[in-house]
Amino acid sequence: MSDQVKYIVGYDGGELSMRAAELAIDKMKARGGGTLLLAYVVDWSEFEVMSVEELAVRHSQHMEHLESAEKDIMEPARAKLATDGITIESHIQVGHAAEVISSLADEKKVDQIFIGHKSSGLLAKLGLGSVAYGILQKAKVPVTVVP
């Protein structure tokens, strides 16, 4: 399977990320199959000032979110996207979505990144969400932004 493609999709369980995943699957089928990585990121800002108690609560919340993400978001996505000739893997991490997805793309040596976009503020005028924009800045492989 070394000649088959490997794509990553920033996946949050929403309609835009499902559209990005479906596009990646379609392109993968056309190329004879491969591996699709679904990346779900629980947002974390290391720049927030918190007490030890607040940090413990935040950590507990993130752990609960990570556990429920696999069952409630990733399992249904894998079932819906299941296709012969395509392996689907899920990766769930805490961090900044653009950083995690870009790093995972490097680590797993993917051929392309697919991301849906949600726009607000100044970036909306440019037609990009902040995560999509961040990935475009960091990625070392082609990025497809799905509206």
Image: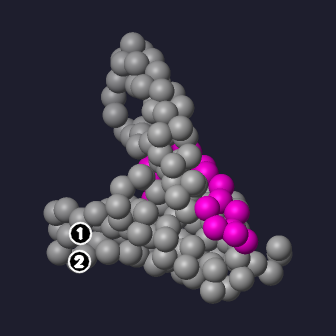
Q: Position of residue 89 (x, y in %)?
A: 65, 55
Quadrant location of the C terminus in the rendered image: bottom left
**Residue 88 visible from this viewpoint:** yes
Q: Position of residue 40 (x, y in %)?
A: 50, 50
Relative horizontal placement of residue 132, taking residue 27 as reference (left or right): left
State yes or no: discs 1 and 2 in contact (Cβ < 8 Å). Answer: yes
Q: Which residues are magenta?
A: 82-98
Image quarter for residue 44? top left
Q: Is residue 44 magenta?
A: no
| Identity of the residue furthest to the top in this view | 53
Say which of 121 and 113 sits in front.
113
Tag 2's secondary structure? helix
Residue type marked 2:
Leu
Say which of 129 and 3 sits in front.
3
Q: Rounded to the nearest whole Å, what is the CA distance between mark 1 and mark 2?
A: 5 Å
Residue drawn at x 73%, y 71% is 85
Relative horizontal placement of residue 5, taking residue 122 as reference (left or right): right
Q: Is residue 83 magenta?
A: yes
**Residue 101 visible from this viewpoint:** no
Label disc, if present, on residue 49 of the rendered structure: none
Tag 1's secondary structure? helix
Residue drawn at x 61%, y 62% is 82
Give the residue number, with chain letter if any, for mark 2: 126
Give the residue number, with chain letter if any, for mark 1: 123
| 62 in relation to 14, above or below | above
